[in-house]
């Protein structure tokens, strides 16, 4: 079931569930583009295929969320809207706010992380590198501590650990950026076995909770939000 927050002839804003690809999947697994195309077809089957010679309706991918991450996303329904929305992403005018549960607590209650990340395509992984490293790309984010508490871990023999709910403003869009930077600064995401070596079972505690941009046609400021639920988020 597709959760639609807003829709008009130019774009559609949806809630992407964790575990689903945000762009077209290469295999037979379900993805958000397919879900949106099916939604458009059901609303107006003749209009969505008749004028296109049997081709599926246009769905432009503007930005991406990693498969294990849920959150608010906008997709374009026309090529013109796609071009204008993509320009906002490139110019840093599309604002994306995330919430995450991290293991431990940042030294400061708010701050900015500035690093250089290098992606290894062979193993689909990124790491923090020196500024002078060949291929490294600038990665910046702002963070703010929302809440922090000590939680007992049954799987650690009754031991406990500090978990912190943080709000993150992503200023650049690098591969696995939030996961890499938070882990690199000593507070890996809860449930992240790739970067944090977390023993915790369950979903990755990361969600894109707010999205704002300017409507590509009307020029109106658009703001959307959702509440993160499930997994470690329920502890807060």
Image (cartoon, rainbow, N blue to C red):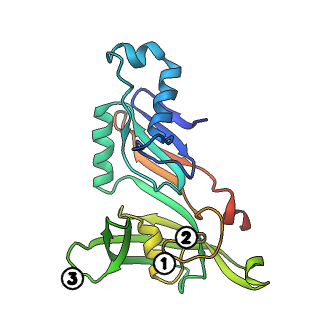
107 to the left or right of 220 = right
**Separation of marks 2 and 3 at Cα, in angstroms:** 28 Å
The residue pinned by badge 2 equals 192
Quadrant of the rendering where the C terminus is positioned: bottom right
Q: Where on the picture, by quarter, is residue 165?
A: bottom right
Q: How many labels does the image show?
A: 3
Confirm whether residue 221 shows in the render: no
**Separation of marks 3 and 1 at Cα, in angstroms:** 21 Å
Looking at the image, do the residues carrying marks 3 and 1 touch, with CB atoms under 8 Å apart?
no
Q: Residues within 10 Å of mark 1 (few under 14, many from 20)?
A: many
| Labelled disc at residue 235 | none
The secondary element bearing badge 2 is classed as loop
Q: Nearer the viewer, residue 236 or 39?
A: 39
The residue pinned by badge 1 equals 183
Establish if 231 lies above or below 212.
Answer: below
Q: Residue at x 55, y 44 (%)?
A: 15
Task: Measuring from the top left, give residue 85's x and y in whole percent.
Answer: 33, 43
* Sequence-wise first label, 2 or 3: 3
**Separation of marks 1 and 2 at Cα, in angstroms:** 9 Å
Question: Closer to the observer: label 2 or label 3?
Answer: 2
Looking at the image, do the residues carrying marks 1 and 2 touch, with CB atoms under 8 Å apart?
yes
* Sequence-wise first label, 1 or 2: 1
Task: Measuring from the top left, give residue 214's x and y in whole percent.
Answer: 38, 44
Confirm whether residue 40 shows in the render: yes
| Labelled disc at residue 132 | 3
* Sequence-wise first label, 3 or 1: 3
Q: Which residue is drawn at 65% across and 64% down?
A: 202
Establish if 4 lies above or below 234.
Answer: above
Looking at the image, do the residues carrying marks 2 and 3 touch, with CB atoms under 8 Å apart?
no
């Amino acid at each position: 079931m597709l959760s639609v927050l807003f829709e008009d002839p130019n774009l559609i804003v949806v809630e992407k569930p964790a575990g689903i690809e945000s762009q077209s999947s290469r295999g037979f697994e379900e993805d958000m583009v397919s879900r949106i195309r099916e939604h458009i077809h059901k609303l107006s089957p003749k209009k969505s295929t008749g004028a296109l010679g049997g081709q599926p309706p246009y769905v432009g991918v503007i930005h991406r969320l990693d498969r294990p991450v849920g959150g608010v996303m906008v997709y374009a329904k026309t090529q013109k809207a796609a071009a204008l929305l993509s320009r906002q992403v490139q110019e840093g005018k599309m604002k994306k706010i995330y919430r995450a549960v991290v293991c431990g607590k940042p030294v400061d209650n708010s701050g900015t992380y500035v690093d250089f990340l290098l992606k290894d395509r062979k193993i689909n992984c990124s790491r923090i590198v020196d500024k002078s490293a060949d291929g490294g790309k600038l990665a910046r984010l702002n963070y703010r501590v929302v809440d922090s508490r000590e939680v007992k871990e049954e799987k650690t023999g009754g031991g406990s650990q500090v978990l912190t709910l943080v709000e993150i403003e992503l200023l650049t869009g690098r591969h696995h950026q939030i996961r890499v930077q938070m882990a690199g600064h000593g507070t890996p995401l809860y449930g992240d076995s790739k970067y944090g070596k977390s023993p915790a079972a369950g979903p990755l505690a990361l969600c894109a909770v707010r999205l704002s941009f300017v409507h590509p046609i009307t020029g109106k400021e658009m703001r959307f939000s959702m509440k993160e639920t499930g997994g470690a988020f329920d502890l807060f």
